[in-house]
Amino acid sequence: MGQAIASIEPAELPSPPRSALRVVEACSQEVVDVRLLADLVSQDQVLAVALLRLANSAYFARASEVTSLAHAVTLIGQRALRSLVLCIAVRDVLKAEQLPAFPLDAFWRAALCRGVCARTLGETLGLDAEACFTLGLLQDFGLLVLFHLHPRHISDWQQFTEMLPDERYELELQLFNTSHERVALQLAEAWGLPRALAVPLGLHHGGPLERETEFEPLVRLAACADWMAAVFDAESKRAAIQGYQSLLEEHFGLSVETADILLEAVDERMPEAARAFGIGLEAQRSATEIMREANLRLAQENLSYQELTWGLEQALRERDRMAQELHRELALAREVQRSLLPGEATSELGIFGVNVSAKAVSGDFYDAFRLATGKIAFCIADVSGKVMHAALLMAKVSSLFRCLAKGIHDPSRLLSMLNRELVETSIRGMFVTLIAGVFDPRSREVELANAGHLPALRVQGGRQVVSYPAMAPPLGVLADVEFPSTRFRLGPDRLYLYTDGLLEAALEGGRQLGMDGLLRLLAGHAHLPPTRRLQEMVAAVRQGGARVGDDLTILLIEGAGHA
């Protein structure tokens, strides 16, 4: 690779106009006269006109019309001027006639998207927004130079546009025996660019920072901007979404919600940025549409509803971190939430339940109450995610269930009604697994429907008789879904419903309780009265060295007089 770089003659490398580089050099000084900067800009008419257009653009939020270069230089500021002049100058370094058959417009559209991503992220992190924009805009310019030096590979450009950043990087190493980062470092040296820009341009794919750790935030920002922009062009949308979400959390501690909000902001800013820099935009899907389609495709491709439930749950766990000052509010929320559970009153109906929260508030809930017909409506549910957002959705679903179940005694129709409501008012990425049923204490008949929840277990003496797995996806994922129900006679058996916090309780050595452990737990406590049985089961899990990392809920249906 080193020989490939060394073989490039300085005369082969493109260079911005000398007038633009003089402005960049002057702006890099600690103190420079505004009139001198304006005079330097005025020596390049194309640069002067472009700078005035940018200074008056909505993208840079100028409150009043800027009519002179001196005024523009004063308003923009020395550091921002250096970044904008460099952006303007570099864009015109390679003309269409120097790259015949290469889609320059498509390249600069992608570069502009990276620039807007970098600027949006930089503002959130409190970094120099214009410097971040310049870094994002120019970070792949070395790749354009490589195509200029090796025009026989221009036909491979379309393949580059559809790849993820790490895949694209590997392909350029194969084709050119070097990388755009190495070319960027050579260009930065030839143009006399400041280290604050040169280092991130040359190391944003993971090169060693060595002693220049002060540039690490910009290096990481460039990597994140690359993955954010890939969401709009890469073929694998889901991988691009997961990539930028993971990087933003790893590098800057930003949550998935914040990452998605940033991407939506990029969507809104792109038209103004394109107008400001005179770059034409093609019609494309919005970030919201891309994310929605990626999530829908994930649901459609997963043949197992149970795997889908656990997969989404794992992806959404622990995504929110509540700050210390919210402790009092969480305690109050917990008190309100506990009031939504039916409590000990259900024992008179032959229904027994226990709920243990992993956090201050829970995303699990259960309910049971007598209907006007004498039958008993019941449910158990697990809301994706944790802490406040899950608790709020739990409260909503709990209230909807209690309200709708009084008039809708068919579990299939009830789940369809709940699902339509959640899809219409869904919060991005959230869903609910839920089993709803009706129990007739006289005939001991049960009818239930399972929406993406763990299987209900009909057990006698600790021995599993039959399980009732999910026959439909979780609530809130897909709009038009049927929720089949099943009917059976409970007889002397016991019906257990539970959430994944029980199966996933981590024992010593990292081993989970699992289904086999659960059946052993049921058999070992089958002789106890119902309420005590559930309490002892929870105590046994914890005393056995288990760590409950998720909310844990168990609902037991025996019927009155069948303890």
Image (spheres, rainbow, N blue to C red):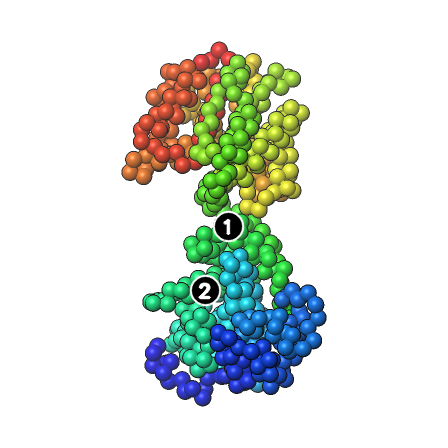
Q: Amino acid at mark 1?
A: Val
Report the mark closest to the observer, 2 or 1: 2
Q: How many neighbours does mark 1 have within 10 angstroms: few (below 14), some (14-19), or many (20 or more)?
A: many
The residue at which mark 2 appears reads as 218
- Residue found farthest to the top: 561
Q: How many neighbours does mark 2 have within 10 angstroms: few (below 14), some (14-19), or many (20 or more)?
A: many
* Residue under the point 64% across and 27% down: 403
Q: CA distance from mark 2 to mark 1?
A: 21 Å
Quarter that holds the C terminus: top left
Label annotation for residue 256: 1
Q: Hey, which quadrant is residue 33 in on the image?
A: bottom right
Q: Amino acid at mark 2?
A: Leu
* Vertical relation: 93 (above or below) 243: below
**Coordinates of residue 453 in the picture (x, y in percent):** 50, 35
Question: Which structural element holds mark 2?
Answer: helix
Q: How many marks?
A: 2
Quarter that holds the N terminus: bottom left
Answer yes or no: do the residues labelled 2 and 1 have beta carbons within 8 Å? no
Apparent side of residue 117 relative to residue 359 in the rendered image (left or right): right
**Coordinates of residue 274 in the picture (x, y in percent):** 63, 69
* Residue under the point 53% across and 34% down: 329
